[in-house]
Amino acid sequence: MDLSVRNKLIQSYQVDGGFIVHDITMLKKIYCALNIEPKMSLDTRIYELEGLTHFFQAAVASLARRININRDDCVLNPGEGSGAPSRLLARMFGCRVTGVDINPNQIKKAKSLAVFHNVQDKVEYLQQDVAELSLAKKDFSKAFINETCGHWQDKEKAFKRIGEHLKPGAFVGLNIWLKGDRGSLNEAYEIVPEFRPLYKEGIWFQDDLNTYSLILKRSGFEVLEKYDCTDKIDVKIRARLKASRQWELYEQSLGTKAKESGVKYFSGMLKTHYDFLRYGVIVAVKR
């Protein structure tokens, strides 16, 4: 990844960036307000707050079941972010997960949250660029790639690197941000004012489903299933914005500024739907 893109990507995912990226202190306050104990509960609000997710917990669990993740699996999770997907997989299915991310701040937070959730024996986190992925373990039984490919500049190189770490016949599940009907989120900067403050410019490399299929095929994978799920996610994000009681509790625990930031984030992202952002799911297998 180009250094300038890497730096802007890291800057976009900061606690004090264009939108709220929760740290562990903030999350503890929220869970206290919501009366949730993360170590004892799979309440969907946990994942949806920690991941700032567009693919909600049900969609993550559904994809995990599609590729048959189970307690015997060692799962590779490239583009891990703050670790929300791996913690959910470990809690729900009992698998072991290695999460990789380019952002050192996200890796640091992921490690602290693993302890907070008491899954530190099931997950590990490493700072690496997925396009330069180099791990000692080369026989992962599954790969789970969640809401991250849109930031990858050289997808073919990245998928080839991922394939080098998987067993033959290993299944791969992808929840992805796709290019919209009018272009990528880079084009949204010029047309959607509400989107501009949310992320740094020039960090988007979205493709459509057919392009992903071609890239995966060239990278040594066979695509078994692919579909667009934009309609479903659009409805869910609109419902989240209308969850007034949850936003009230959020404001009570973190303050008015935090609530306004959260509302602006989802409102701004909704403005990009269809034109500059679609969502898709792919299931593939390593040949």
Image (tube, rainbow, N blue to C red):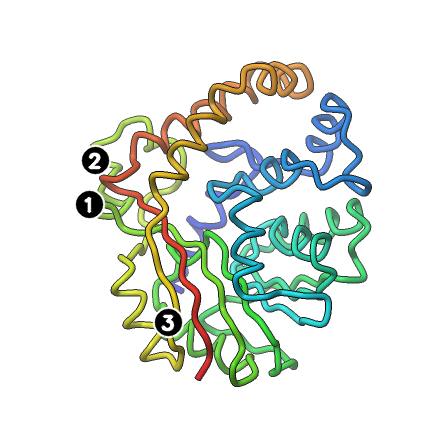
* Residue 30 in view, yes or no: yes
Q: Residue at the left extreme?
A: 182
Disc 2 crowd rating (10 Å Cα; few below 14, some 14-19, many 20+) is few
Q: Nearer the viewer, residue 220 or 158?
A: 220
* Residue 4 in view, yes or no: no
Image-quadrant location for residue 245: top right
Choose mark 3 or mark 2, whichever is in front: 3
Q: Nearer the viewer, residue 78 or 37?
A: 37
Q: Residue at x 37, y 52 (%)?
A: 280
Q: Estimate the x, y position of residue 174 in percent, counting from the top left.
A: 45, 60
Disc 3 crowd rating (10 Å Cα; few below 14, some 14-19, many 20+) is some
Q: Residue at x 34, y 39 (%)?
A: 231
Q: Give the CA distance from mark 2 to mark 1.
A: 15 Å
Residue that mark 3 sits on: 223
Image-quadrant location for residue 216: bottom left
Name the secondary structure under disc 1.
loop
Residue that mark 1 sits on: 181
Give the mark nearer the N terminus: 2 vs 1: 1
Position of the C terminus by quadrant: bottom left
Residue that mark 2 sits on: 190
